[in-house]
């Protein structure tokens, strides 16, 4: 049906009407005092969201712009770095790092498994020249959450290295206390937990990260964070930012502030659990290792049924867009996004749509309604 699409992919995520309406306003001058006030208010709210006293800089560009900015501002050609790689986005970190001539050591885990913090510890303990540990917190391609807290702890006992984390699908979904965990640089993007359209990305920097910028010799201009820092301190931007996306950002951050961090994390946790248990109860498997599922996304392995067929049928019958598997996982898994502007109704509906689809494909192994019953039970047990 036209105009009835429900996004349940891990970005772009659904956008609240209040945020959409903000986008429809006339642009205002980006050097006007009115706009400066918006920069000031959104910057304060971004710091609240990241639980940091450091800086959070806003870039017009997608999440990858924030990832690239993180690398080119804190590192130098030939620097030794460790990249965690257990999915598509971990691979992206490796590609960006190599594009800029960094000396990359990768620590891998099988797709579906989390990175092992001890492997980071042992390399760090034996090499004082490592300059950065670069990882993906919530690996969107597999639905795995990595142990950013433990990995950061190991980096803190190393004298030269900083931690750079892609928190694109963890910020606004689960607890990422930047200062408490000592994460030095965090990259994120607007079309994920921020409940916004794509177009803005964010780089959070603490003092150690700024210290690292002093020796960084990689080429940069549009993504030179010194110029973002200089201007944000005057409630402004180095270039013309997406003014309308800033309007949207303020609305979405105010909605998040209103809901409160604890409630946001609790909501994502409930939705993750309800989705996981419902999927298991209808005889499908979870792709992420038990206990390491991402609060933003659940990867499903339908055991012998073509995952793409399920995904396409759900889209056709119910106008719900699920994500497919990437690379070698295409056809092997599908992914249910439950990130951002998602409520209990969305979860129940998605589970019902998947059950109904399996029934139609003659692949439902359990009585129709089992998944909805399971999800309902969990959602009722754990109130928001
Ligand atoms: C979406 C996403 C990104 C950013 O991708 P863009 O398309 O550049 O916005 C980066 N990392 C992860 C884990 C993501 O899910």
Image: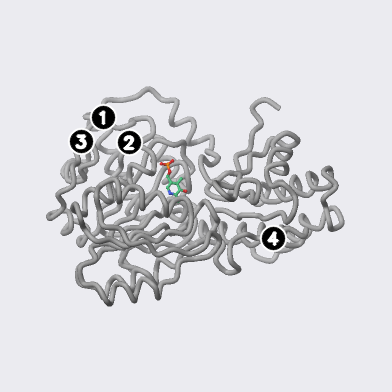
Crowding near the residue tagged with mark 2, few <14, some 14–19, many ≥20 C-alpha atoms within 10 Å: many
Residue 75 at least partly seen: yes
Give the x, y percent position of residue 119: 39, 73
Give the numbered dot on residue 285: 4
Which residue in the protein does label 3 denote?
A: 238
Give the x, y percent position of residue 243: 33, 30
**Alpha carbons under labels 2 and 1: distance apart:** 9 Å
Q: Earlier in the sequence, mark 4 or mark 3?
A: 3
Helix or strand or loop: what does disc 3 sit on? loop
**Alpha carbons under labels 2 and 4: distance apart:** 39 Å
**Residue 64 sits in which quadrant?**
top left
**Alpha carbons under labels 1 and 3: distance apart:** 7 Å
Q: Residue at x 51, y 40 (%)?
A: 12
In the rendered view, does 151 fall on the left or right side of 75?
A: right
**Above-or-below relation of 236 to 84:** above
Q: In this rendered view, identify the residue nearer to me: 116 or 80.
A: 80
Query: Contact, CB < 8 Å: mark 1 with mark 3?
Result: no
Give the numbered dot on residue 240: 1
Query: Contact, CB < 8 Å: mark 1 with mark 4?
Result: no
**Residue 236 sits in which quadrant?**
top left
Residue 384 at least partly seen: no
Q: Earlier in the sequence, mark 1 or mark 4?
A: 1
Give the numbered dot on residue 60: 2
Give the numbered dot on residue 170: none
Q: Residue at x 53, y 34 (%)?
A: 17
Query: Contact, CB < 8 Å: mark 2 with mark 3?
Result: no
Q: How many marks?
A: 4
Quadrant of image for the N terminus: top right
């Amino acid at each position: 049906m036209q105009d009835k699409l429900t996004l349940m992919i891990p970005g772009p995520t659904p956008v609240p009407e209040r945020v959409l309406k903000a986008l429809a306003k006339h642009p205002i001058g980006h050097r006007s005092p009115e706009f400066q006030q918006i920069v000031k208010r959104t910057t304060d709210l971004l710091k609240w969201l990241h639980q940091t006293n450091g800086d959070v800089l806003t870039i017009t560009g997608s999440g990858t712009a924030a990832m690239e900015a993180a690398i080119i501002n804190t590192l130098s050609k030939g620097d030794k770095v460790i990249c965690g790689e257990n999915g598509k986005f971990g691979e992206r970190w490796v590609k960006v790092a190599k594009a800029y001539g960094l000396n990359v050591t990768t620590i891998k885990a099988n797709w579906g498994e989390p990175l092992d913090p001890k492997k980071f510890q042992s390399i760090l303990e034996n090499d004082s020249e490592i300059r950065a540990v670069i990882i993906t917190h919530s690996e969107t391609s597999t639905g795995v959450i990595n142990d950013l807290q433990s990995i950061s702890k190991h980096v803190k006992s190393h004298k030269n290295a900083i931690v750079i984390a892609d928190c694109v699908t963890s910020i606004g979904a689960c607890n990422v206390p930047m200062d408490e965990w000592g994460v030095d640089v965090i990259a994120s993007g607007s079309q994920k937990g921020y409940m916004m359209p794509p177009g803005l990305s964010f780089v959070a920097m603490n003092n150690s990260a700024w210290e690292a910028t002093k020796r960084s010799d990689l080429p940069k201009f549009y993504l030179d964070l010194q110029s973002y820092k200089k201007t944000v301190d005057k409630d402004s931007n180095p270039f013309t930012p997406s003014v309308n996306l800033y309007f949207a950002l303020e609305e979405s951050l105010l909605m998040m502030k209103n809901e409160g961090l604890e409630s946001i994390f609790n909501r994502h946790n409930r939705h993750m659990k309800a989705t996981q248990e419902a999927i298991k109860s209808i005889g499908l498997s979870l792709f992420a290792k038990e206990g390491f599922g991402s609060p933003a996304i659940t990867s499903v392995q339908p055991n012998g049924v073509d995952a793409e067929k399920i995904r396409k049928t759900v889209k056709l019958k119910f106008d719900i867009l699920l994500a497919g598997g990437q690379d070698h996982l295409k056809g092997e898994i599908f992914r249910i996004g439950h990130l951002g502007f998602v409520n209990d109704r969305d979860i129940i509906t998605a589970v019902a749509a998947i059950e109904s689809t399996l029934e139609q494909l003659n692949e439902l192994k359990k009585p129709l309604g089992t998944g909805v019953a399971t999800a309902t039970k969990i959602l009722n047990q754990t109130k928001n």
